[in-house]
Image (tube, rainbow, N blue to C red):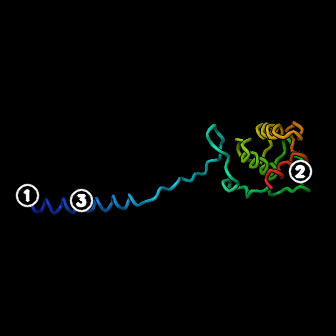
Amino acid sequence: MNIKFIRSKMISLGLITASIMTVFANVTNVKAQTNFPYVPGPFTAPPSPLVEPNFPGRIRQSSRTNAPLLRRGSRGQAVRDVQIFLRQQGFYRGAIDGIYGSQTSASVLAFQRRYNNLSNDGIVGRNTWSTMFGSIS
């Protein structure tokens, strides 16, 4: 083979490789975004309200004057709001499904134990709602 031909191909290949490496070297690091729910662990911090797409930082359906009594067996948007709130506070690790089951009840109990003025009954009543609203205000 012709040495000039081989040398010209190697130079071309070198220039192409250098160009590609320059492009990749200038790319900034981007954090991956996932749709996985937040599950608190020993080395993670609770997310800010902006992380949870279904929760705009406030309880949507209920207010201080119109908060429903929630207990095991309750269903709906108010239960979903409580689950999201408890997840953001680091108490709830289950699915955000709007069903007040055993995991939601246990999370409510843990939240109630954190505050001395709440009864530890696992029921989201007036005082528990009031404390939740006070936590997000």
Label 1 SS: loop
How far is the residue under mark 3 from the one under mark 1? 20 Å
Identify the residue under disc 2.
Answer: 68
The local secondary structure at tag 3 comes to helix
Task: Look at mark 3 in the image and give the residue it sits on.
Answer: 14
Mark 3: amino acid? Gly
Q: Residue furthest front?
A: 116
Q: Which residue is mark 1?
A: 1
Q: CA distance from mark 2 to mark 3?
A: 70 Å
| Quarter of the picture holding the N terminus | bottom left
- Above or below residue 9? Residue 104 is above
Q: Would residue 21 appear left or right of 27 to someone viewing this image?
A: left
Q: Tell me whether the residue at label 2 lies in contact with that at label 3, contact meaning CB atoms closer than 8 angstroms.
A: no
Q: Position of residue 124 (x, y in %)?
A: 86, 44
Tell whether 10 sits left or right of 102: left
Q: Sequence order check: which comes first, mark 3 or mark 1?
A: 1
Q: Is residue 1 above or below residue 118?
A: below
Marks 3 and 1: which is nearer the front? 3
Query: Crowding near pointer 2: few (<14 within 10 Å), some, many (20+)?
Result: some
Looking at the picture, which amino acid does disc 1 mark?
A: Met
**Residue type pointed to by label 2:** Pro
